[in-house]
Amino acid sequence: MDLADLAYRALIPPIVLAGLLAGCAHLPTLIVPRDPLSAEEHTRLGAAYEAQGLRKEAVEQYKAALKKDSAYVPGWMASGNASFDAGDLKSAKRSFRRALKLSPQHAGAGNNLAMVYLAQNTNLDKAEQLAQEALAQGGPLKPYILDTLAHIYLRQKRYCEARAALEQAQAVAPPDNDAVGKRLLETRALIDAAQR
């Protein structure tokens, strides 16, 4: 083998490699799809799924919303409400605490965390404090918060305070909201039964 032959053989591997690499430029590129929905859109989609009874799909959307924006309070609220409705009080508590951490004056988060404590029959003093703080915010949640307070007082056997909270709730409840009206009637029946 002469010197020219050796030089030729030494060039073959780089030339072949260059040809192969040039051919790779035409291979398809793997593209990871980007989620086009915002946290708000995921939360709205989750609510739509929930309204249709598709709980699993709703929860997936709430998780996607929080993955998109972990500081999105409505996503934490929706996730907490779904967990509470499913009886997963531990997850509900975590979600409502996170919402309160992000928005300390959020009346809904405070009331809902109080409801979790009430459902667990623990930290009733903390539940009362949370409900009182939420009540101080005013707004359309007032009858719901007063109902929560009535239930806390009922659980603590503070019947006069439970009845007073209920009467305040009935006074501020929108007359056209049948769900609130029904809930308050159920609370009245519980207070009446407890006082017999």
Image: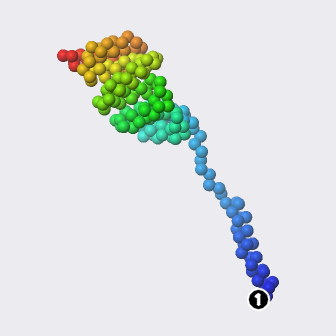
Residue positioned 42% across, 32% down in the render: 96
Residue placed farthest to the top in the image? 171
Image coordinates for residue 36, horizontal then vertical, percent: 59, 40
Q: Residues within 10 Å of mark 1 (few under 14, many from 20)?
A: few
Quadrant in the picture for the C terminus: top left
Image coordinates for residue 154, horizontal then vertical, percent: 27, 21
Quadrant in the picture for the N terminus: bottom right
Query: Is 36 situated above or below 12?
Result: above
Disc 1 marks a residue whose amino acid type is Met
Image-based side of 71 in relation to 52, left or right: right
Residue positioned 37% across, 15% down in the render: 169
Residue placed farthest to the left in the image? 196
The reply to whether residue 12 is visible in this rendering is: yes
Image coordinates for residue 137, horizontal then vertical, percent: 46, 19
Image coordinates for residue 142, horizontal then vertical, percent: 41, 17
Residue assigned mark 1: 1
> In which quadrant of the rendered view does residue 95 lie?
top left
> In which quadrant of the rendered view does residue 152 lie?
top left
> In which quadrant of the rendered view does residue 144 lie?
top left
Residue positioned 78% across, 80% down in the render: 8
Query: Is 32 situated above or below 82?
Result: below
